[in-house]
Image (cartoon, rainbow, N blue to C red):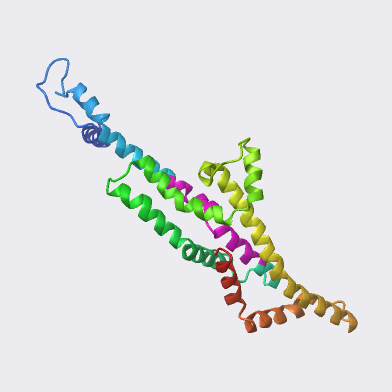
Amino acid sequence: MSTRNRALALVAFVALMTLCPVALAQTTPGNPLGIDIAQAAQRAVSPDRISTTMTLMLLLTALSLAPAILVMTTSFTRIIVVLGFLRQAMATQQSPPNQVLIGLALFLTASIMYPTYQRANQEGVQPYIRGEITGEQAVQKTLGPMRDFMFKQTDPKSLALFLKIGKLGRPKSPADVPTAVLVPAFIVSELRIAFQIGFIIYIPFLIIDMVVASTLMAMGMMMLPPVFVSLPFKIIMFVLADGWYLVVESLVRSFN
């Protein structure tokens, strides 16, 4: 056997001995390694090991779904859509760049969602860590603050639409609304509000474009693209009006 094969065999043997704790017994012809197979199997399926494995699987699943959870259940969608409308209305192409807009949206989301996540941590995560509640209770108590946030921002019309799609009856209380119905209704409501804010943002920039285009046409300068002339006026107007402060303040207040 080559040195490489012997090294692989040694590693495999060490891994087997590590993952499956064994009780060394007296070597017999039917058990040359002296391993108590029954005891090793019993240890492998013991409740503590299964619990650890399930916890690891749930953690990996949560990490893989974290981006979707961030987008679908927080204020991130509304903020990033409004910032995208603002950049298009100003016609500044890739300025600010996508990384800056996403970073700003993430920090605004963290600021807006901080009270909700703090409540979820206090009511669900910390009691579970201390062993005061079960895993199922922890999930329900952790989802409670997030559901409350989504209910406040969800349009009843959108919620009724997805209840109808799911062929569910009229709920007697918010607790009767499944999370699978609440999340898409929340997303549709967020998109509706984001487009409304985007329309309001577009109006002053559109007026500048119309004034500049009319002026250039009256001067006979039809070959000059109006966007080249209107862009500096848009930027100076946005700066003088302290536009970033107004946009951020309006976004944060829209969640209150």
Q: Is residue 185 visible?
A: yes
Is residue 143 shown above or below 87?
A: above
Residue 148 to residue 163: above or below? below
Magenta stretch secondary structure, dominant: helix
Q: Please say whether residue 69 is one of the residues in the magenta stretch.
A: yes
Query: Residue at the location (57% across, 76% down)?
Result: 245
The quarter of the picture where residue 96 lies is bottom right
Viewer-closest of 19 and 76: 76
Instruction: Give percent across and percent down for residue 133.
Output: 32, 44
Q: Quadrant of residue 226?
A: bottom right
Residue pushed farthest front? 172
Residue 95 to residue 195: above or below: below
Asked if one can make out residue 91 in the rendered structure from this viewpoint, the answer is no
Instruction: Please state if 107 lies on the left or on the right of 238 as rendered.
Output: left
Residue 83 percent coordinates (x, y): 61, 66
- Residue under the point 88% across and 79% down: 217
Dividing the image into 4 quarters, which one contains the N terminus? Answer: top left
Count of labels shown?
0
Q: Position of residue 158 (x, y in %)?
A: 65, 49
Instruction: Give residue 8's quadrant in the image.
Output: top left
Q: Which residues are magenta?
A: 62-85
- Pick the quarter of the image with the C terminus: bottom right
Q: Residue at x 67, y 72 (%)?
A: 92
> Does residue 99 sit above or below 123 in this rendering?
below
187 drawn magenta = no
Q: Is residue 58 left or right of residue 153?
A: left
What percent of the width, then of the height, locates residue 188? 64, 52
**Point 77% across, 78% down: residue:** 208
